[in-house]
Image (tube, coloured by chain):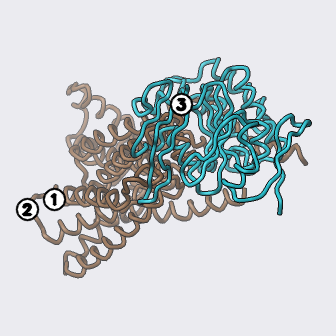
Chain colours: A cyan, B brown
């Protein structure tokens, strides 16, 4: 198990956000987290990256208590693409992607040739190379999101956490980014944990799905077995039809009006 | 057409990135400015004489001093040099402090006074003047510093919430708390002025800032504090870069955001407080210099902080020399920086909008 989540609870301003949540996540898999707005998905991710600490319960990373890791150590283990990707100062695209390498570069050292090479490669792969010298502050939302995605890939960690990381991208770039994440899972045995709004996108990329509602996980398992009209009704309260689609080679969902 | 726009949008900054020599050049300009400004004033002293007097004093070689009038030595070593060095150090300190504030509050319009440091210092100084305490020349700076420091902790206390998403201190909370506390203190200062009777002119004059009759004690005090503050800021410069991506992302890149915010906030505020307590309130330097440097060299704090420090030192030193030696009557330095800095700031602000 890469993450063992044992009965965690979190509340904020006396409002319970995560409620006795338990789950085990295996390494080398692509996980999707689905659930209605405000069900605690982002808070759950915050707890996984130790941006917040659970009030009770424990999270174990590779069998060790997550709270025993320093922020510094975790930055070499877990990368995050956060929902808010606004950046306040006019850094260039290349500078932002290089920030992903900071955890691997000593404080006062300059980037090694390997760091530079890795950044170049990722800028090429994510297609941000064509605007590498532009200011992040003058890019469109979609371009900025790709830069932030590239920065997380440059961090080169065993775990990649995506919080609606493709929300502003067109379909071409959405598929491009998710393919890059899926490639990491297949080729380098990385673990991806992604909060996704689009159920069909989740169905075609994620091997496992976790459905959240009111701070709890209400359904979890391999995508093929857990993605059913019953699950979707109980979580989102909408009617749907689930069928196997041969073109995407995955289960797909259509919704009734 | 397309090519032209892509050229325009290219910000590789190669000329500055490759040239680390620019810091060395600025150090050279600063030294030159110190020597030149020591020479000019009511009594002109040739630059070579200035260099000889200074080097003789530093090396302790009294033989070199034989050729010089005693008066010249006193003017250089005890009158002009302390004032000039204090102005340079304060300029550097305010600029670094401003750069740090802008980085932490994620607001390019923040300055060392955003959190009410100036209002706190002004209140402390006004109180000292009004009470006319017997602590001699040190009562005003002492009270000014105490006022600034108290204000800082009050603002942090107001802004702090244990479980806020930002990890305790959000920039919005800090800015709001700063504005509230400043407003209260301004009212307090007005009240003190109202009570002050004939001392009101001393209060007003202090508030406008001046480097007149600074001593070596001031130089040493500011040098030590600004120096330590600068080193702390530079140590965390890379983490400050990551803060611009938001707290969540900064955490995931290995930054302890709560600790960083607190450490840098206190460092930058105390730096500003020391500067204010020896010089009075000098506006626009802390806002303008980091802004200008970011415009020229980019927002990377590892370069921005040293560049801001050197440029701030040069600019405030030159401004002080203008009021001291160039203008027919000395006007308070705070007024001069605001009169020059304000319109200049409008200009670059407007220009950046249009570009």
- Asked if labels 1 and 2 share a chain, the reply is yes
**Is residue B29 in view?**
no
Q: Chain of mark 3?
A: A
Q: Residue B289: horizontal and vertical position, in percent? A: 50, 50
- Asked if labels 1 and 3 share a chain, the reply is no
Q: Is residue A17 left or right of residue B135?
A: right
Front residue of this view, candidates B151 and B29: B151
Q: Residue A187: horizontal and vertical position, in percent? A: 73, 20
Residue B134's disc is 2
Image point (37%, 53%), residue name: B162
Q: Residue B90: horizontal and vertical position, in percent? A: 36, 49
Q: CA distance from mark 1 to mark 3?
A: 60 Å
Q: CA distance from mark 3 to mark 2?
A: 66 Å
Front residue of this view, candidates B5 and B240: B240
**Is residue B202 in view?**
yes
Q: Which residue is mark 3?
A: A3
Q: Residue at the far top: name it.
A: A113
Category of crowding for the residue at label 3, using alpha-carbon neighbours closer than 10 angstroms: few (below 14), some (14–19), many (at least 20): some
Q: Chain of mark 2?
A: B
Image point (50%, 49%), residue name: A18
Image point (45%, 59%), residue name: A15
Quarter holding the C terminus of chain B? bottom right
Q: Residue B88: horizontal and vertical position, in percent? A: 38, 46
Q: Which residue is mark 1?
A: B139
């Amino acid at each position: 198990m890469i993450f063992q989540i044992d009965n965690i609870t979190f509340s904020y301003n006396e409002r319970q956000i995560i409620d006795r949540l338990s789950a085990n996540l295996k390494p080398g898999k692509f996980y999707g987290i689905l659930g209605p707005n405000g069900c605690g998905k982002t808070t759950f991710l915050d707890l996984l990256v130790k941006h917040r600490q659970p009030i009770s319960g424990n999270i174990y990373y590779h069998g060790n208590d997550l709270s025993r890791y320093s922020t510094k150590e975790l930055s070499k283990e877990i990368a995050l693409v956060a929902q808010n990707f606004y950046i306040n100062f006019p850094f260039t695209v290349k500078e932002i992607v290089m920030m992903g390498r900071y955890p691997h570069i000593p404080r006062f050292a300059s980037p090694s040739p390997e760091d530079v090479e890795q950044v170049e490669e990722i800028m090429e792969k994510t297609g941000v190379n064509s605007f590498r010298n532009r200011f992040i502050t003058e890019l469109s939302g979609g371009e900025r999101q790709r830069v932030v995605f590239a920065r997380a890939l440059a961090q080169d960690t065993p775990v990649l956490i995506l919080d609606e990381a493709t929300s502003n991208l067109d379909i071409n770039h959405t598929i491009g980014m998710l393919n890059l994440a899926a490639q990491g899972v297949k080729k380098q045995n990385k673990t991806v944990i992604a909060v996704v709004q689009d159920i069909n996108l989740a169905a075609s990329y994620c091997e496992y799905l976790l459905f959240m509602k009111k701070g709890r996980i209400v359904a979890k398992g391999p995508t093929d077995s857990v993605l059913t009209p019953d699950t979707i009704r109980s979580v989102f309260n909408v009617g749907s039809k689930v069928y196997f689609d041969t073109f995407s080679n995955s289960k797909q969902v259509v919704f009734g009006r | 057409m397309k090519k032209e726009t892509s050229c325009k949008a290219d910000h590789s900054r190669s000329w500055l990135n490759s040239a680390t020599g620019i810091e060395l050049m600025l150090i050279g300009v600063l030294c030159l400015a110190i020597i030149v400004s020591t020479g000019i004033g009511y009594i002109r002293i040739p630059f070579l004489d200035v260099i000889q007097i200074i080097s003789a004093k530093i090396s302790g070689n009294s033989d070199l001093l034989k050729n010089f009038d005693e008066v010249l030595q006193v003017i250089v070593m005890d009158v002009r040099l302390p004032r000039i060095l204090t102005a340079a150090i304060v300029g550097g300190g305010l600029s670094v402090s401003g750069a740090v504030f802008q980085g932490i509050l994620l607001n390019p319009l923040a300055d060392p006074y955003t959190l009410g440091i100036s209002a706190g210092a002004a209140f402390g100084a006004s109180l000292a003047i009004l009470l006319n305490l017997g602590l001699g020349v040190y009562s005003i700076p002492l009270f000014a510093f105490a006022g600034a420091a108290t204000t800082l902790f009050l603002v942090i206390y107001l802004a702090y919430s244990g479980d806020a998403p930002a990890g305790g201190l959000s920039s919005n909370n800090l800015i709001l708390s700063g504005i509230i506390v400043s407003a209260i203190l301004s009212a307090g200062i007005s009240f003190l002025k109202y009570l002050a009777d004939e001392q009101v002119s001393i209060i007003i004059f202090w508030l406008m800032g001046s480097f007149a009759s600074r001593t070596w004690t001031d130089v040493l005090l500011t040098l030590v504090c600004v120096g330590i503050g600068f080193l702390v800021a530079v140590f965390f410069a890379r983490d400050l870069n990551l803060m611009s991506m938001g707290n969540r992302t900064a955490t995931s890149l290995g930054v302890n955001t709560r600790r960083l915010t607190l450490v840098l906030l206190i460092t930058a505020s105390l730096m500003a407080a020391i500067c204010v307590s020896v010089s009075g309130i000098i506006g626009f330097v802390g806002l303008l210099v980091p802004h200008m440097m970011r415009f020229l060299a980019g927002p990377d704090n590892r370069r921005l902080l040293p560049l801001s420090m050197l440029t701030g030192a040069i600019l405030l030193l030159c401004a002080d020399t203008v009021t001291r030696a160039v203008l027919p009557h000395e006007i308070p330095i705070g007024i001069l920086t605001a009169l020059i800095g304000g319109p200049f700031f409008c200009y670059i602000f407007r220009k950046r909008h249009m570009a």
